[in-house]
Image (cartoon, grey):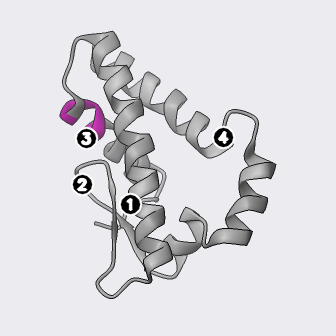
Amino acid sequence: MKVVIIALVSLVLSSLVAGDGLAADAQLATRAIGPSLGQARSTGAVVESIDGYVRAANGAAAEVRRLVTQVNQRRRDAYKKIADKNGTSVVAVAAASYQKRRGKGGASR
């Protein structure tokens, strides 16, 4: 069951990163409205949390806080779909997602 959850988390992460084929449009829109998640991470304005969500650093700009809210909502929705499909909890899926990101060097907390 854990292997299935991790595989599904990988699929969801790929989908979130790729934007389901809309990555170029998303990048253009992001440049117009604010930082990307990658940019915010690289500056330390956003960190990955052990609970599978991102957190804005203290004093982060309003646009970074909005980005965090949007990313976490997409993640929550994706985690719920995976959890429902596999009869597990959202918390378990989120934790597996964190572990997957950590293995890729994307986590900092």
Q: Name the residue tied to disc 1.
A: 107
Q: Amino acid at mark 1?
A: Ala
- Label 4 crowding class (10 Å Cα cut-off): few <14, some 14-19, many 20+? some
Q: Quadrant where the N terminus lies? A: top left
Residue 67: give x, y in percent of width and height: 48, 63
In the rendered structure, the answer to whether residue 82 lies left or right of residue 95 reads: right
- Label 2 crowding class (10 Å Cα cut-off): few <14, some 14-19, many 20+? some
Q: Amino acid at mark 4?
A: Gly
Q: Is 90 covered by the magenta stretch?
A: no
Q: Quadrant where the C terminus lies? A: bottom left
Q: CA distance from mark 4 to mark 1?
A: 20 Å
Q: Amino acid at mark 2?
A: Ile
Q: Nearer the viewer, mark 4 or mark 3?
A: 4
- Label 1 crowding class (10 Å Cα cut-off): few <14, some 14-19, many 20+? some
Q: Secondary structure at mark 1?
A: loop
Which residue is at the front of the view, 19 or 73?
A: 73
The dot on residue 19 is: 4
Q: Name the residue tied to disc 3.
A: 95
Q: Secondary structure at mark 4?
A: loop
Which residue is at the front of the view, 31 or 8?
A: 31
Are the two marked residues, 4 and 3, in contact with CB atoms closer than 8 angstroms? no
Magenta-highlighted residues: 91-95
Q: CA distance from mark 2 to mark 4?
A: 23 Å
The dot on residue 50 is: 2
